[in-house]
Image (cartoon, helix red, strand yellow):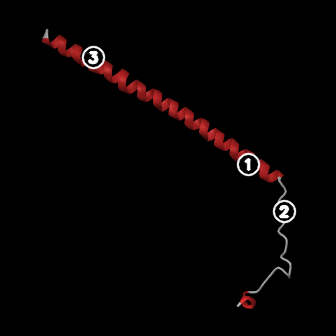
């Protein structure tokens, strides 16, 4: 009789361990992986959109400073 009670108690502990620890960890891990994949896809899409917008935009060329705008350091002292 005592052996049966011990076996039932061990079975109960195993049951609680599986359903209160293992399964929730498995579900949480799966959900985190799914969210991380979605986040990575969003980052990749944003980077791709940024690359295409940068390539299509015409960058203005740097204009040379006018000779009147430039002041030598020696002239200021």
At 67% across and 43% down in the image, what residue appears? Answer: 44
Q: Quadrant of residue 71?
A: bottom right
Residue 67 place in picture, x, y as percent? 86, 82
- How many numbered marks have been drawn onto this rendered protein structure? 3
Q: Which residue is mark 1?
A: 50
| Helix, strand or loop under label 3 | helix
Q: Residues within 10 Å of mark 2 (few under 14, many from 20)?
A: few
Q: Nearer the viewer, mark 1 or mark 3?
A: 1
**Position of residue 57 in the picture relative to residue 2 (left or right):** right
At 69% across and 41% down in the image, what residue appears? Answer: 45
At 27% across and 16% down in the image, what residue appears? Answer: 11
| Helix, strand or loop under label 2 | loop
**Could you say which disc has been placed on residue 60 in the image?**
2
User: Taking 57 as reference, is 5 above or below it?
Assistant: above
Q: Nearer the viewer, mark 1 or mark 2?
A: 2
> Which badge, 1 or 2, comes first in the chain's sequence?
1
Residue 51 place in picture, x, y as percent? 75, 50
Depth check: give the residue in front, 62 or 23: 62
**Position of residue 12 in the picture relative to residue 68 (left or right):** left
Residue 17 place in picture, x, y as percent? 32, 24
**Position of residue 18 in the picture relative to residue 60 (left or right):** left
Q: Which residue is mark 3?
A: 12
Q: Nearer the viewer, mark 3 or mark 2?
A: 2
Residue 66 place in picture, x, y as percent? 86, 78
Q: Residues within 10 Å of mark 1 (few under 14, many from 20)?
A: few
Q: Quadrant of residue 34?
A: top right
> Which badge, 1 or 3, comes first in the chain's sequence?
3
- Distance of label 1 from label 3 (alpha carbons): 56 Å
User: Taking 38 as reference, is 3 above or below it?
Assistant: above
**Position of residue 30 in the picture relative to residue 71 (left or right):** left
């Amino acid at each position: 009789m005592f052996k049966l009670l011990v076996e039932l108690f061990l079975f109960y502990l195993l049951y609680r361990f599986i359903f209160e620890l293992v399964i929730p960890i498995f579900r949480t891990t799966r959900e985190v992986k799914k969210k991380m994949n979605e986040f990575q896809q969003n980052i990749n899409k944003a980077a791709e959109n940024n690359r295409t917008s940068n390539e299509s935009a015409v960058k203005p060329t740097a204009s040379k400073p006018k000779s009147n705008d430039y002041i030598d350091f020696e002239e200021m002292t």
